[in-house]
Image (cartoon, grey):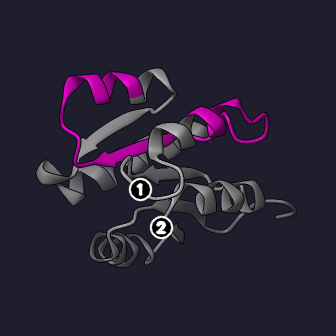
């Protein structure tokens, strides 16, 4: 088992503490290890250190917003292949298109989010990585 992680690591980047806690509780059991950050700057430093298997990313955050995070993250040689799913209150098509153009693999609007659908999408994307 040299070099093989036992659990896949999800980095959840969200400044809403209630949603962050809900996502943590939902995904921290079972096969995932959860790392959390409440702003883009901290998330970027953490991602460089832990190399997560996937990032769940809010767009509207302090210090560095999600669009800025995506731009830097996807330009980073060691991080650019890590899938990013956006979770945002921004439901307009311009925000969705911009996030996907910057490298997001999928986009969920928080007001319409179904956590089971999100969990299924995460599982599907991570199963394609292996």
Q: Which residue: 37% across, 35% down?
A: 106
Q: Which residue: 32% across, 49% down?
A: 87
- Element type at marker 2? loop
Q: Quadrant of residue 11?
A: bottom right
Whole-percent x, y for residue 35 in the image: 56, 70
Q: Note whether 120 is above or below 77 in the view shown.
A: below
Q: Are marks 2 and 1 in contact (CB under 8 Å)?
A: yes
- The outermost residue toward the front is 63
Tell me if residue 102 is in the magenta stretch.
no
Q: Note whether 14 is above or below 112 in the view shown.
A: below
Whole-percent x, y for residue 124 in the image: 41, 42
Whole-percent x, y for residue 122 in the image: 41, 49
Q: Which residue is mark 1?
A: 61
Tell me if residue 93 is in the magenta stretch.
yes
Q: Which residues are magenta?
A: 71-98
Nearer the observer, 19 or 27: 19
Q: Is residue 118 left or right of residue 2?
A: left
- The outermost residue toward the left is 112
Q: Which residue: 69% across, 30% down?
A: 75
Residue neighbourhood size for the residue with mark 1, other residues' Cα within 10 Å, grouped as few (<14), some (14–19), many (≥20): some
Whole-percent x, y for residue 84 in the image: 49, 42
Q: Note whether 82 is above or below 110 in the view shown.
A: above
Q: CA distance from mark 2 to mark 1?
A: 7 Å
Quadrant that contains the C terminus: top right
Q: Say whether disc 2 or disc 1 marks the residue closer to the N-terminus.
A: 2
- Circle on res. 38: 2
Residue neighbourhood size for the residue with mark 2, other residues' Cα within 10 Å, grouped as few (<14), some (14–19), many (≥20): some
Q: Which residue: 42% across, 50% down?
A: 123
């Amino acid at each position: 088992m040299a070099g093989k992680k036992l659990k896949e690591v999800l980095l959840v980047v969200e400044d809403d503490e209630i949603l962050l806690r809900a996502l943590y509780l939902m995904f921290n059991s079972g096969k995932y290890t959860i790392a959390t950050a409440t702003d883009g700057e901290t998330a970027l430093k953490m991602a460089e250190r832990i190399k997560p298997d996937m990032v769940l990313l809010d767009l509207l955050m302090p210090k560095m917003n999600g669009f800025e995070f995506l731009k830097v993250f996807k330009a980073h040689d060691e991080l650019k292949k890590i899938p990013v799913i956006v979770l945002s209150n921004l439901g307009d098509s311009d925000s969705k298109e911009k996030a996907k153009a910057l490298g997001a693999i999928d986009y969920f609007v928080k007001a319409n989010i179904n956590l089971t659908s999100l969990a299924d999408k995460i599982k599907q994307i991570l199963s394609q990585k292996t």
